[in-house]
Amino acid sequence: MVSVISDICQERGHQTVAYSSGAKALENLSAQAPQLVITDLRMDKVGGLDILRECRDILPGTPVILITAFKTVETALEAMKLGAYDYITKPFKVDELQLTIQRALDNQSLVRENQNLRQIVKEKYRFENIIGTSGKMQEIYNLIAKVADTDSTILIQGESGTGKELVARALHFNSNRQHQSFVAINCSALPENLLESELFGHKKGSFTGAVADKAGLFEEAELGTIFLDEVNSMPQPLQTKLLRVLQERQIRRVGDNKTIPINVRVLAATNEVLGEKIKGGNFREDLYYRLAVIPLEMPSLRERPDDIPLLVNHFLQKNANQTSTEIKKIDPKAVEMLSAYRWPGNVRELENAVERACALCDNGLILTTDLPPQVVRHANAPVVEHTGTLPVGQTLDEYTREVEKAYIEETIKFNAGSREKAAKMLGISMATLYRKLDLKKPATKK
């Protein structure tokens, strides 16, 4: 039997090591480290279950196929519970054995590929990969390192584009839940009824279109992490249901009267100041405190301009990897221009600007002319200097209007008297420019 199975495997191009003694096989199991083990279930002294147990201990990723007589099928089923990949009853067909072997090897390849992908993702989302050496970013690193491997609910606050989801993924992939699912949902992307169904699932027939039972994202994230992005946009009725989930650690599908216990870590993010929404009655204060067990504040890019050159180099490397090209060089003046800009879209806007520059530049060198227009306009905008004593005694509105008017007039001079160009540089409409200068807008020609 050993010779027959060995020949069948070799005909399919597999290398085999054959043993007619279970004891001898155990002696060499660790040294051989096979990709697959095929063993009879019943043998003298050392049987198939002994080999299965040893494989589980020293080669946990190696599938084991058991060959058994019809009388011992029940034992083979028990072996499946112990971790055997499959069993075949004697007498077997050659095709059946070959198919089972191939399935076992394919499954093992998928498992290893999945493990490799998880390792790659973990490397990608190591918190050290969140770029920045500024003091504010060092605080973020320290906090992530302390709380990643806990089950605490964390609220990540910050403007759009500051990297809140990147931090959420870093928290997950550096926690003891890293081998389980990370499920993310943008709470502003769906209307209330669909968002409720997505989060908590629904029962068949609970609403029009519910043609079958559906598990929600909380169930999909079981033993892992769920990330509620833009939780600030969640409708109030759903805020109440989310609060109950956080308190009771169980969910109820739409249209169902049964509860389902969950073991999920919750991370949430907001791009608005929730304190203002709470004052306005648009966000539950008790939900805020449930979400913000540990609050984490992401700084805007304008708060850490020293990190911009580091980020630029990171995005140049990333672009080269994605396009399989050499890393583009960048003129120091272009870096200065990027560092001086205010970046209302934060890190995401900077990444887009670098990607754009990589596509437009010639000869692998990024110049100031390759940067986005708004960055160039900001760098070339005139600086209005105040001289003399500030006019104390005016209201703040009066003073602001005077300074604003002077700045607009200087911008018009800078553009050789062109109000159209000045308005474009200032990022305002012509109507706004005329209003702020207390001028009448020219009549439109008919």
Image (tube, rainbow, N blue to C red):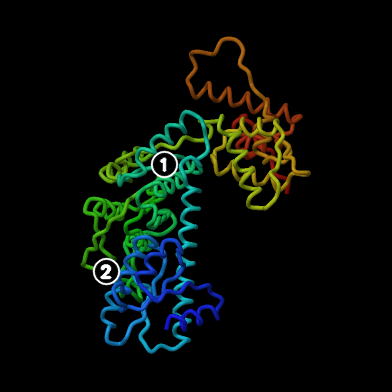
Q: In the rendered image, which residue does mark 1 sit on?
A: 272
Measured from the top left, where is residue 396 in percent x and y? 48, 22
Q: Earlier in the sequence, mark 1 or mark 2?
A: 2
Q: Residue 18's image quarter?
A: bottom left
Based on the displayed image, in which of its 4 quarters is residue 289 positioned?
top left
Q: Secondary structure at mark 2?
A: loop
In this image, 348 relative to 166: left or right? right
Residue drawn at (34%, 40%) of the image: 147
Q: Amino acid at mark 2?
A: Gly
Residue 335 higher or lower than 410, as above or below: below
Tell which of 300 and 441 is nearer to you.
300
For label 2, the residue is 255
Rounded to the nearest whole Å, what is the CA distance between mark 1 and mark 2? 32 Å
Would residue 352 be found to the left or right of residue 267 on screen? right
Mark 2, other Cα within 10 Å: few <14 / some 14–19 / many ≥20: some
Q: How many marks?
A: 2
Q: Quadrant of the N terminus?
A: bottom left
Foreground: 114 or 315?
114
Residue 33 sits above or below residue 290 on the image: below
Kind of residue sitting beneath label 1: Glu
Across and down, in percent, residue 365 comes to 74, 40
Dots 1, 2 in contact, CB < 8 A: no
29 w.r.t. 352: above or below = below
Q: Nearer the viewer, residue 147 or 435?
A: 147
What residue is at 73 percent from the left and 37 percent from the top? Answer: 367
Say the numbered circle drawn on residue 220.
Answer: none
Q: Give percent across and percent down for residue 183.
A: 40, 57
Q: Give the image location of residue 225, x and y in percent.
A: 36, 53
- Indicate the secondary structure of the residue bearing disc 1: loop
Mark 1 crowdedness (10 Å alpha carbons): few <14, some 14-19, many ≥20: some
Determine whether, in the image, residue 8 is placed left or right of residue 308. Answer: left
